[in-house]
Image (cartoon, rainbow, N blue to C red):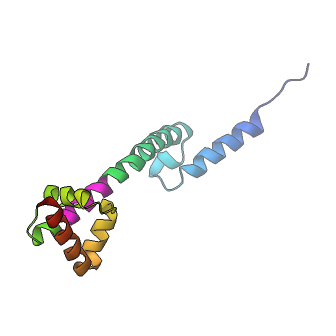
Amino acid sequence: MVRVSNGAALRQKKNRRLKQAKGYWGGRSKLWRTATETLLRAWAFSTRDRRQKKREFRALWIVRVSAAARMRGMTYSAFIDGVHKANIQLNRKQLAEIAIHDAAAFDRICEEAKAARA
């Protein structure tokens, strides 16, 4: 029976993993076991942070809309309530962009929100 070596496949696996760890500090980019541990941890963080990024952006949009609404004499919760009651189909990202780039349009939205709440 012929003895089968796994040498080429193992070397390719190691090279692929070490290439992925390129740029890490010290042994994390050069040592097989350390690089593997670091990559597993990095992949776990990247999975977590893809979801966290969505939360952080939503919080940023809320802060921006809140600041813009307060400049026009409304609280954030009253503004959002008015927007929903006025049946304005804009999400928080769109409202934040309008608040930054088009003050006149945001003023009109605020007026509609105030009218819908009254």
Residue 53 at x, y = what percent? 36, 53
Using the image, determine if residue 52 lies above or below residue 36.
below
Residue 40 at x, y = what percent? 49, 39
- Give the quarter of the figure containing the N terminus: top right
Q: Is residue 64 magenta?
A: yes
Q: Which residue is located at x 18 percent, y 62 percent?
A: 116
Q: Is residue 28 magenta?
A: no
Instruction: Determine the image quadrant of residue 93.
Output: bottom left
Q: Which residue is located at x 50 percent, y 43 percent?
A: 39
Q: Which residue is located at x 53 percent, y 39 percent?
A: 36
Write down the region rendered in magenta: 56-68
Residue 90 at x, y = what percent? 33, 63
**Pick the front one: 30 or 76:** 76
**Pick the front one: 36 or 49:** 49
Q: Which residue is located at x 14 percent, y 59 percent?
A: 117
Using the image, determine if residue 57 lies above or below residue 67.
above
